[in-house]
Image: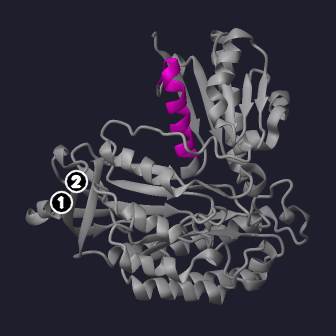
Amino acid sequence: MKNKYLYIQTFGCQMNVHDSEQMAALLAPGGYKVTDNVKLADLILLNTCSIREKAAQKVYSELGRLGKFKEQNPDLIIGVGGCLAQHLGAKFYKRIGHLDFVFGTHNIHRLPEIITSLQSKREKITKVDFYKTLNSIGIYAPPANGAVNAFVTIIQGCNNFCAYCVVPYLRGPEMSRPADDIIEEVKKLTDQGIKEVTLLGQNVNSYGKNLKNGLNFTGLIRKIGEIAGLERIRFTTSHPRDLSEELINCFAEERKLCEHIHLPVQSGSNRVLKLMNRGYTVDEYMEKIDHLRRVCPQISITSDIIVGFPGETERDYQETIDMMEKIRFDSAFSFKYSERKGTAAEKLAGKIDECERQQRLKYLQELQNKHMQERNAELIGSCQELLVEGRSKNSENDLMGRTRSWKIVNFKGELDSVGKLLNVTITKAYLHSLRGKLLEEAGNVN
């Protein structure tokens, strides 16, 4: 079969990255080979995010740029998937006339039939239906050659309806995959050389709630931990309200569970958290942080923070700063509030002007950078176990690995170390990475 070329551009989170991997796997039997060169493409897919307005504008800009390739090659097929596609549906065609099809978050599995239909008859196709079954999240995506880590989706959708968030409307309600299916997928990945899996979901802590007589999330982690050949387990994302004592204790009890949790706090103000419909208080969040650090002192804690939410006063903002000073996150994704149509926050009074939001974000990010540098510096002189992932992005002469706490470490080593667990001594600390020196006895980690 003659190869055709597929170009995929992914916007947004790790879940979107994995969705793109699944798209490529679905289309491979039809002769499509992934390329990084858009000029070679017979099929272009944009897998979109709709969480913030900036992400949406990037998609429009990229689609505009792709129009020239359509002019040069009328047979080129261009499609848009993901959250923005789910949100806009057929409205996309009014703005982007050269777009051929739009498919929503529950319709990844329909890609092959969509492409076949377009090849026989060029009519615009829109598929944005929601389904009561998990057709699109159990698609197996074989790991790339040499890959040592992989994503596995365990739950789709969200039931939380945070005031600022469109995800429940665009991903649908929470649905958990059967544990046996997840475990079988992890075994297949491990058989193909994967050493580390990251379990994905909008709220992984809710895993199993819609399954009759199924495992809860902690039970699933323990079952995956029994799989031979797998070295590490990670997960994202956790909702603080649903972070159970059982799951917290799992960080001390399950050897393969890495010492890192991403726990979005969003604000340090109880008043703002209530407006956001987050379902917890700052004190409750802090108690869970303290519990995590008691049972697992070396744990790395990362977070998400929004500034300039409607009605956020200077006092509310200062409470967020005070909370950050107490917790000292290892890293945090921070954003200016971005209004999304259809959310509860759209109707709230007290909108903060752009200049004020930008000033608040700037100071908060400067503070977080200070905390990141200090937290990284604390590791100088320590021995850290790395899973070696490949060459460093900074230098072809270096290798790169991650600590169990999700820190990037660059070090001198041989390429045959990729996929191995090695020990290094941390010699230098930077804002976004560490420098390490390989220990002579590191080979005994495996």
- The structure's colour scheme is one colour
Q: Residue 332 in the image: state x and y as whole percent.
A: 54, 68
Q: What residue is drawn where x is 50% and y is 50%?
A: 181
Given the image, on which type of amino acid does mark 2 rest?
Lys
Going by the image, does 181 lie left or right of 97?
A: left
Residue 32 versus residue 186 in the image, above or below: above
Q: What residue is drawn where x is 87% and y is 61%?
A: 346
* Mark 2, residue position: 420
Residue count near mark 2 (Cα–Cα under 10 Å), binned few <14, some 14–19, many ≥20: some
Please state which of residues 393 and 4 is positioned toward the viewer in this rendering. Answer: 4
Going by the image, does 129 lie left or right of 381?
A: right
Instruction: Find numbered disc 2 in the image and state the secondary structure of the residue it sits on.
Output: loop
Point out the frontmost of discs 1 and 2: 1
Numbered mark located on residue 172 in the image = none
Compare marks 1 and 2 and give the one earlier in the sequence. Answer: 2
Q: What residue is drawn where x is 12% and y is 63%?
A: 444
Q: Residue 432 in the image: state x and y as whole percent.
A: 41, 62
Residue 287 versus residue 131 in the image, above or below: below
Q: How many marks?
A: 2
Going by the image, does 43 lie left or right of 279?
A: left
Residue count near mark 1 (Cα–Cα under 10 Å), binned few <14, some 14–19, many ≥20: few
Q: Quadrant of the C terminus?
A: bottom left
Please state which of residues 122 and 65 is positioned toward the viewer in this rendering. Answer: 122
The answer to the question of whether label 1 and label 2 lie on touching residues, with beta carbons closer than 8 A, is: yes
* Mark 1, residue position: 446
Please state which of residues 369 and 70 is positioned toward the viewer in this rendering. Answer: 70
Given the image, on which type of amino acid does mark 1 rest?
Asn
Q: What residue is drawn where x is 45% and y is 10%?
A: 1
Residue that sits furthest to the front in the current view: 213
Stretch of the chain drawn in magenta: 16-33
Q: Is residue 318 magenta?
A: no
